[in-house]
Amino acid sequence: MVKKLFAQTYLWALLLLLYSPIVIIIIYSFTEAKVLGNWTGFSVKLYTSLFSNGTHHSLVNALINTITIALIAATASTLLGSVAAIGIYNLKSRTRKAVGFVNSIPILNGDIITGISLFLLFVSLGISQGYMTVVLAHITFCTPYVVLSVLPRLKQMNPNIYEAALDLGATPMQALWKVIVPEIRPGMISGFMLALTLSIDDFAVTVFTIGNEGLETLSTYIYADARKGGLTPELRPLSAIIFVVVLTLLIVINYRAGKNKK
């Protein structure tokens, strides 16, 4: 009984520690106070000001850049990672373990090392840094996560269904699209969501590959804003919107996954 009470108390304390800052940001997004923690009355002015014409043009541009880069990187890394996972799964056992170990290195490697490495690579190849280099960098560090999301689904799959589809007259491409892809789709969706979140959240890799052409993402905008001595109040409603959107997507995906299992 005591052990169960301790476990529940620890769990609730951990959840409180994780989510209380987010709740505080959401609460103070409904007040006009410029300083977080100073409640000046309920207001939605920060929400209206966030998307008003020209008021926070650079912040909205940073948000648009972040979302488009994340969507492109997540889509490309999902496709590349899924194909790579299928290839790794069909390797011999020893080779599969070796390639899997190599795939894990970028995940365990520090983001700052990845950022510096990609920066040096682009400089040595004479590639001017900007939007394209950021997209390529995000695809690079997101793909290994997709591979790890898809591989377990391949291991759970019946290995004979692909051969059965070929025996029934399907071409390799048809068997891949109609047999393999439906089996690994949950892993692909999880990998896409993970890649999307990682891309939106990334700072270390982005700051080394963004160049000096004026391109900004949310992470670099917030960093530059914080160095000026404070954060733009409109970041509070923006953070609240992002949290609610991501939470809604997770709930919908989990609901559909549970419905499919039933």
Image (spheres, rainbow, N blue to C red):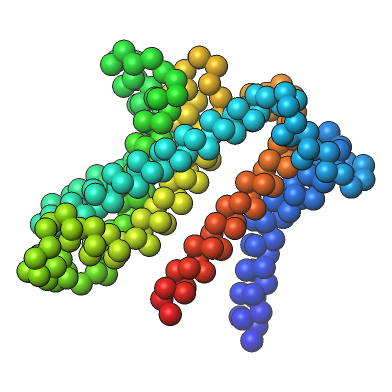
Instruction: Report the number of numbered marks.
Output: 0
User: Vertically, is 146 above or below 162?
Assistant: above
Report the residue at 19% width, 52% height from top: 88
Quadrant in the picture for the C terminus: bottom left
Q: Is residue 1 left or right of residue 192?
A: right
Between 259 and 12, the one nearer to me in the picture: 259
Which of the 4 image quarters holds residue 119? top left
Question: In the image as oriented, which residue stretches furthest toward the right?
Answer: 41
Between 254 and 51, the one nearer to me in the picture: 51
Question: In the image as oriented, which residue stretches furthest toward the bottom?
Answer: 1
Question: In the image as oriented, which residue stretches furthest toward the front?
Answer: 169
Quadrant in the picture for the N terminus: bottom right
Report the residue at 31% width, 21% height from top: 121
User: Vertically, is 119 above or below 36?
Assistant: above
Image coords of residue 37 (percent x, y): 84, 43
Q: Is residue 155 left or right of residue 210?
A: left
Report the residue at 28% width, 16% height from top: 125
Report the residue at 35% width, 47% height from top: 78
Residue 78 can be seen in this image: yes
User: Vertically, is 76 above or below 179?
Assistant: above
Residue 112 can be seen in this image: no
Q: Is residue 54 left or right of residue 69?
A: right
Image coords of residue 142 (percent x, y): 38, 42
Between 97 and 41, the one nearer to me in the picture: 41
Image coords of residue 173 (percent x, y): 16, 54
Between 146 and 74, the one nearer to me in the picture: 74
